[in-house]
Amino acid sequence: MLRLRVWGGTVGRVVSRARRTGVTVGFIIGSATLFAGAAATKINPQDAEFLASVNRTITELAGQPGPQASSTCDRIVASTINMDAVIQSALSQMWGRISLQQRTAFRAAARRWAVRDCLRQNQGNEGNPLEFLGIRQGEDGERLLATRSSKPAHTIIWHLRGSGRVRAVDVVIDGGSMVLSLRDETKALLDRNNDDIDIATEILGR
């Protein structure tokens, strides 16, 4: 959703990036054929409602003007993404070394970063719902929900956790991981600013 190319042309890139994010090659290739046969797992009611909620917001977001779209994207990020899990995965050991105030500031900056990405990647969104491809168990209790959008055309794998409240701890779109993107961008900002997390946070949130 946050970054909603035709599937057949991106398999190689998706497989390569997926190895870095813990998604099996078999899972990705299986999704290209709609998880034919016994490999697919039926979606449970909680995950089905998660997907339905995402599709409702896709429809709502289509054609919205800038300020309204920004507000909708902010709501999408808050309701579908576990940003604390994304941030802690992205920052890794640094998360434990920064102060509570710095964590709060970085959390707000990362949310604005995610909203910007939502706006950018939903340009041209025509409101078509995501197609359910299949779902499988991943590592650490994650459920890997594979979906596909039509216009714009992308394959999206949601790493879901939770039972009562289901949210994504990573979103892999055409092989690009949200966690890795945030990690790479934060590292680049730190490298350019003498590892100053406060400066990096301020730039990230612009």
Image: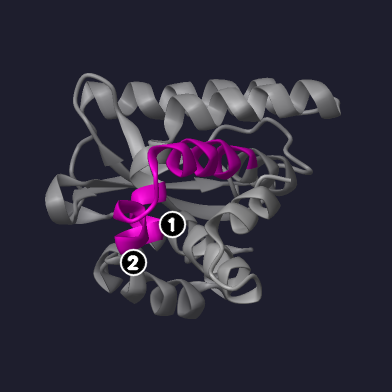
Q: Nearer the viewer, residue 36 or 172?
A: 172
- The Cα atoms of the two marked residues, 1 and 2, are separated by 9 Å
Magenta stretch bounds: 87-112
Q: In front: 42, or 205?
A: 205
Query: Is 139 situated left or right of 72 in this image?
Result: left
Kind of residue sitting beneath label 2: Thr
Q: Nearer the viewer, residue 107 or 123?
A: 107
Q: Secondary structure at mark 1?
A: helix
Above or below, 69 against 26 in this view is above
Q: Position of residue 182 (x, y in %)?
A: 52, 58
In the picture, residue 118 is in which quadrant? top right
Q: Is residue 64 visible?
A: no
Image location of residue 11, percent across then percent down: 47, 74
Looking at the picture, tell me which residue is in the foreground, 197 or 40: 197
Residue drawn at x 72%, y 38% as measured from the top left: 125
Q: Is residue 104 magenta?
A: yes
Q: Looking at the image, which residue is at 29% across and 40% down?
A: 160
Q: Which mark is residue 36?
A: none
Report if residue 164 is visible in the image.
Answer: yes
| Residue 21 numbered mark, or none | 2
With 148 as the anchor, is 67 left or right in this view?
right
> The N terminus appears in which quarter of the rendering?
top right
Q: Earlier in the sequence, mark 1 or mark 2?
A: 2
Callout 1 crowding tier (Cα within 10 Å): few <14, some 14–19, many ≥20 = many
> Going by the image, does 2 lie left or right of 70?
left
Residue at position x 19%, y 25% in the image: 163
Answer whether residue 152 is magenta in the image: no
Badge 1 vs badge 2, beta-carbon distance below 8 Å: yes
Residue at 74% in and 46% down? 206
Q: Tell me the residue that label 1 is attached to.
A: 179
